Amino acid sequence: MTSLTPAYPTQFTFYHPIAVRYADLDTHRHVNNISILEYVETARTAYYQAAGIWDGVTVENMGMVVVSVKCDYLASIAFGQSVRVGLTLSVLGTKSLRFRFQVEDEQGRTPFARGEVVMVSYDHFEGHSRPISAEWRQKLAAFEHREDFLV
């Protein structure tokens, strides 16, 4: 057995605390898989606000849709546990944003779930994808400390 700590939890730019609700539990009395994806969505929208690409109010400037979600469930979460979601933007494409996430205990020692969400910049009025704006690109590059996002 190895004593090495995996590098995955240390690679997140943003952490968002989550309160586990009784309503999140399933019949086995642990957090249901769909609730974990809701935790990720909650953290992702908080990330958008922290990065400055969404004000948390208007929907006109939000302009993104989920195109892919992959989640590996690693351990059960019980009612009353304190958890957080770590997020980082791993790839910023022409139209897409690829986020890595991990749901973990509040100290970052125990991972409960990890995966990836791919978002696409989307014009809801026109009904099609659109390139990521220069403004978003600049804000995300600054937030993630990634100059390669400006290319």
Image (cartoon, rainbow, N blue to C red):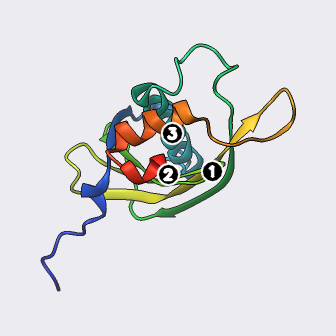
Residue type highlighted by circle 1: Ser
Residue type highlighted by circle 2: Val
Q: How crowded is mark 1: few (under 14 residues within 10 Å), some or many (20 or more)?
A: many
Mark 3 falls on what kind of element?
A: helix
Mark 2 falls on what kind of element?
A: loop
Looking at the image, which residue is at 62% across and 40% down? 132
Mark 1 falls on what kind of element?
A: strand
Residue at the spot of label 1: 96
Q: Distance between the residues labelled 2 and 3?
A: 9 Å
Residue sitting nearer the eye, 43 or 12:
12
Q: Measured from the top left, where is residue 94 in percent x and y?
A: 63, 51
Q: Distance between the residues labelled 2 and 1?
A: 14 Å
Residue at the spot of label 2: 151
The dot on residue 53 is none
**In the rendered image, is residue 24 in sight?**
no
Q: How crowded is mark 2: few (under 14 residues within 10 Å), some or many (20 or more)?
A: few
Picture mark count: 3
Residue at the spot of label 3: 137
49 over 6 or under it: above or below: above
Residue type highlighted by circle 3: Arg
| Cβ–Cβ under 8 Å for marks 2 and 3 | no
Q: Residues within 10 Å of mark 3 (few under 14, many from 20)?
A: many
Residue sitting nearer the eye, 27 or 55:
55
